[in-house]
Image (spheres, helix red, strand yellow):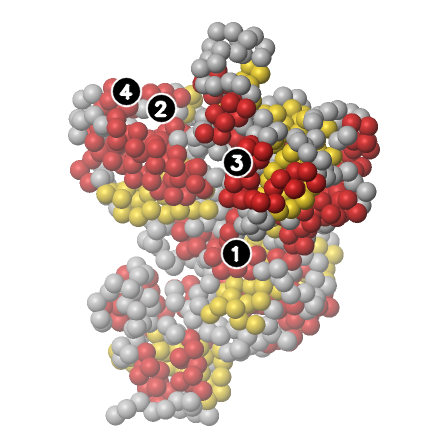
Amino acid sequence: MDILRILTLNGPNYWSIERTQLIVLRLDLGRWAEVRTTDIPGFYERLTRLLPGLAEHYCVAHRWGGFLQEVQHGTSLAHVVEHTALELQYIAGMNVSFSRTRWTSTPGVAQVVFEYEQPEAGRVAGRAAVRIVHTLAQEQDYPLEELIEDVGELRQIRAEAALGPSTEAIVRECEARGIPWQERARGIIQFGYGCYQRRIQATQTDCTSILGVELAGDKEGTKQMLQEAGIPVPKGTVIRRERELADAIHEVGGYPVVLKPLDGNHGRGITLDIRTFEEALAAYDLAMAESRAGRVIVERFHQGHDHRILVINGQVVAVAQRVPAHVVGDGVHTIRELVAQVNRDPRRGEGHDNVLTRINWDETTEQILAQQGYHAQTVLAPGEIAYLKRTANLSTGGTAVDRTDDIHPENAWLAVRAAAAVGLDIAGIDVVTTDITRPLRQTDGVVVEVNAAPGFRMHYRPSEGLARNVAAPVVDALFPPGRPCRIPIIAITGTNGKTTTTRLTAHLFKQTGKVVGFTTTDGTYVGDYLVEPGDNTGPQSARLILNDPLVEIAVLECARGGILRSGLAFRECDVGVVLNVAADHLGSYDIDTLDDMAKVKSVVAEVVRPGGVAVLNAEDERVAAMAERVKGRVAYFSLQADHPRIQAHRRRGGLAAVYDQGELWLYQGEWTLRILRAADVPLTLGGRVPFMIANVLAAVLAAYAQGVTLAQIRQGLRTFSASTSQTPGRMNLMPVGSFHALVDYAHNPHGYAAVADFVRSWQEGLRIGVIGGPGDRRDEDLMQLGEIAGRVFDWVIIKEDDDLRGRAPGEVAELIRRGLMQAGTTCRWEIILDETTAIRTALGKATPGSLVVVFPEKVKRAIELIQQNGLPAPS
C-alpha cells in the first residue's frame, strides 16, 4: 500500500460543506485492491483486539456498530484505513467522526477521506492507519508498543497545538455566535474579517492598553496608582539588596510579611505569611531569582482568603475564592499518601486542559510542611488541613470556589475602580479579605495585585460552585450590538470568465467608495494596488484579503484547484457566482466527468449564507441545478430573456439579469429595470462578444444584490474595458498598424469556442490564430482545440507552452494538429513550438484589416510583443 498524495483541507470542500477539516489520502492498494477483509484469515480478530473502540463506529446507513459488521461481511482495506485513522485520533482525545472512501478511475487507487482536529495529527494518523492495516493484512499482529507510540505522538501533537483554556473559552463563545476565527502569528487569534476584525492574545484584546499591561507588571507602580485612588493596599517597600531586608520588614510594621518579585506573575517567586528572618532570607532568594528587574517587594501580610475578581469592560463578571493546594487528614493516611489520593481525582491532570491541576511534590512543598510542623509521613487527624503550596494559583494545584453572588457591592465597585486606575479592559483583581461579603474597610482587606491577561479557568470551570460564562462579556465587548464581524464576501467560480467577472465586480463595488480587495489569476489587489502578482485564486490569497484590516469588501476568484487541494478560505459568503461548467482540467485530482466538476464548482453556491444570493447561469443545466442546494436566494442570468427558467423564476418574484435586443435588463419579479445598451459597455466590444455580455450580467447581479445602486453600476460598466490594464489576457483587442491583434487566455475548448464566436464576425483581411494548450489536459481536449481553430481561422500557427507539464516536446502540438485535420478545414497551418517566435511570425503574416488572435501561455509577454508592433519573424 502506497500513499500517493495527502491533501489537508481546511474549509468547505468537494467532500463536505459542513465538515471543513479533512485529510484526503490518495491510496494505491496495489495487490490488496481486490482483497476483502473476509479473504484474510484472522483479520477481524486482530483488528478488534488492537482497536476495540471500532465497535462503536457508525456505518451502513449510520447504524451504530455498523463498521465492524461491514468488516465481518467483507469490505475493502481502504475502508478499514478510513476508520482506523479516525479511531487513532479518537484514542488520542480528538473528537472526529466524519469519513468517506471512494474508488477512483485509476485501477487499485482509492481516495480515503477522514476528519481531523489538528492537521499534523490527521496526517500522522493517516500514515499510521496505512501501516496498521498493511500489517494486519499480512496476517501479522501490529505491535502494541508501536500503537502506543503512534497514539502518544498524536497526543503530543494535540497538546502542543491546543489553545490555552482562556483563549479556548473565548473561541468557543465566538463559534457559538457564528463569528469566524483563525490563529495568526505568536498566538494571536483573529475574529472576523477585513475592517471588522478583532484580535486577542490570551485574555488581552486589541483594546488592551500597553500602558496598562506595563503598569500591571510593575507591582510597586500599580500599588502607588491604587493608593492614590484611595483603594486599600498593603503597606510595603521595594529593596534591591539582602542587607536592606531587615529594615524593610521593620518599615512595613514587622511580621508577618510577604515577599515577591517586583515584576513577577502567575504566583512565581511569592512567599506568604513569613514570620522569621530565616524564612525571610529564603523568600528573598526565591523572589530575586524570579525578578528580571532585580528588585523585591516586602509587604505587610494581611490575614484572610485569596479572592480573584474578574473585571471586563468596566463590570465585575465573576469572583472566585482561591484555596492553596492542600490535603485534609483522615487519621489513617500520611500526607504523601493523601496527596496521591487527591491526584487520582479525574478532574486533575497536567497543564490547563483539566478542571484542576495535579499537585507536584517538590522541595517547596516540604519547606511549607516543615513551617506547619509536618513532614511527608505525618498522619493528620481527621479534618486537619495541611497546606502544600505558598500561593493559591490553580496551576500549582489550588482550587477555586465561585463567590460571584456573594461579593459586597462596595468591593465590586473597588475592583472596577482598580482596573480603571491601572487602565485595563480585562483585569484580574486579587483581594485578600476574611469575608468577601463585607466591605474591605471593615475586614482590614486589601487589593494585593492587579493582573493583566487574567486566567479564566477558575471562573468557567470552578472546583466548587456555579460555572460562569466569562467569555461572553469579552465577546460582547469585541462585537457590541450592531457591530458586524464580517465584510461582504463575493465568491466567483466557473470554468471560463472568472477573472474578468471578478475584476468587473470589484470595479462595480469600487463605485461605492469602499476599499475592495480582490483575487484573480493575475494577482491579488487591495484598492487600486497590486499586493502580490501571480495566479492567486486559492485560499491563501483569499485569506490575505480577508485578513487585511483595510478591506471593506472582498471579491474572490475561486478556482477548482484551490477548492480540491485546500477547500475554501471562508465558511460562508454573501454572494456566490457560478458562471459555467465546461471540460477543463478533467482527469486532474480524480475529477473525471463534467458532473464531478459541477460538484466542485457548486461548493461556492452551497456556502452562500441564508439571506445571501447565489448567482447562477440559467442556460447551463449543471449550474442551474445547483439552486436546489442553495441556502440563500437564487438569482439567474441569461442571454435569452425568454428562457423558460428565467420566466418561471420571474413569476416567483425572483431576481434575474438578461440580455434582450441589444439591452441589458434587471428583472425583480414583475419589475423591469434597464441597465445599459450592451454596445455602451466597453467590455463587450460593442456588444459583439456574447460571453462577455454574460460575464457583465453576472457581475451586475452580484453588485446589485449587495446594494450597489443602478447609477453606480452604470458608471462602473461604462468605465471598465477589456484593456491590457483592466483585464490583461481577456479579449484584449489592440490596433497594430493596419491590422488588429486579440489576446485571450482561453486554454480549453469552451474558452476557444467563446472567442471563436467573435472571430467569425471579423470580415476583413486574414484571420490568423496562434494556438496551443496546457500539457496536463486530456488528449481529446487538446485535439478539440485544433478542431475549433480549424473552423474559424484562415491560418493557424501551433505553438507549445514553455512548461510542457509532463509532455514530450512536440506532443501537444501534434495532438492539436490532429484535431485541426479532423475539422476538414482548408486553412493553412504550420507548427512553431516557441511561443515568442510563433507570435512574431503571425504578426509578420498579417495583411491590412487582418485579425491576429493569440492564445498565450504568458499574457504579459504576448502583449509586450504585440505592442512592439509585430517584429517580423527571422528568416
On the image, numbered disc 4 is attached to which residue? 49
Q: Are marks 2 and 1 in contact (CB under 8 Å)?
A: no
Q: Are marks 2 and 3 in contact (CB under 8 Å)?
A: no
Residue positioned 63% across, 35% down in the render:
258
Q: Which mark is drawn over residue 282?
A: 3
**183 left or right of 679 in image:** left
Choose between 153 and 5: the one closer to the eye.
Answer: 153
Residue positioned 71% across, 55% down in the render:
668
Bin the neighbour count of mark 4 within 10 Å (Cα to Cα): few under 14, some 14-19, many 20 and up: few
Looking at marks 2 and 4 on the same chain, the residue that comes earlier in the sequence is marked by: 4
Q: Marks 1 and 3, how far apart in space?
A: 53 Å
Q: Does dot 1 land on a helix, a strand or a loop?
A: helix
Q: Marks 2 and 4, how far apart in space?
A: 10 Å
Q: Amino acid at mark 3?
A: Ala
On the image, numbered disc 1 is attached to which residue? 543
Where's residue 713, x and y in %?
68, 67
**96 left or right of 796 in image:** right
Residue positioned 59% across, 30% down in the render:
276
Where's residue 475, x and y in %?
67, 42
Looking at marks 1 and 3 on the same chain, the residue that comes earlier in the sequence is marked by: 3
Q: Does dot 2 land on a helix, a strand or a loop?
A: helix
Residue positioned 33% across, 40% down in the render:
124
Looking at marks 2 and 3 on the same chain, the residue that comes earlier in the sequence is marked by: 2
Looking at marks 4 and 3 on the same chain, the residue that comes earlier in the sequence is marked by: 4
Nearer the observer: mark 2 or 3; the answer is: 3
Q: Is residue 361 visible?
A: yes
Q: Marks 2 and 3, how far apart in space?
A: 56 Å
On the image, numbered disc 2 is attached to which residue? 54
Q: Does dot 4 land on a helix, a strand or a loop?
A: helix
Where's residue 633, x and y in %?
64, 47
Q: Which quadrant is the N terminus positioned in?
A: top left
Q: Marks 4 and 3, how far apart in space?
A: 56 Å
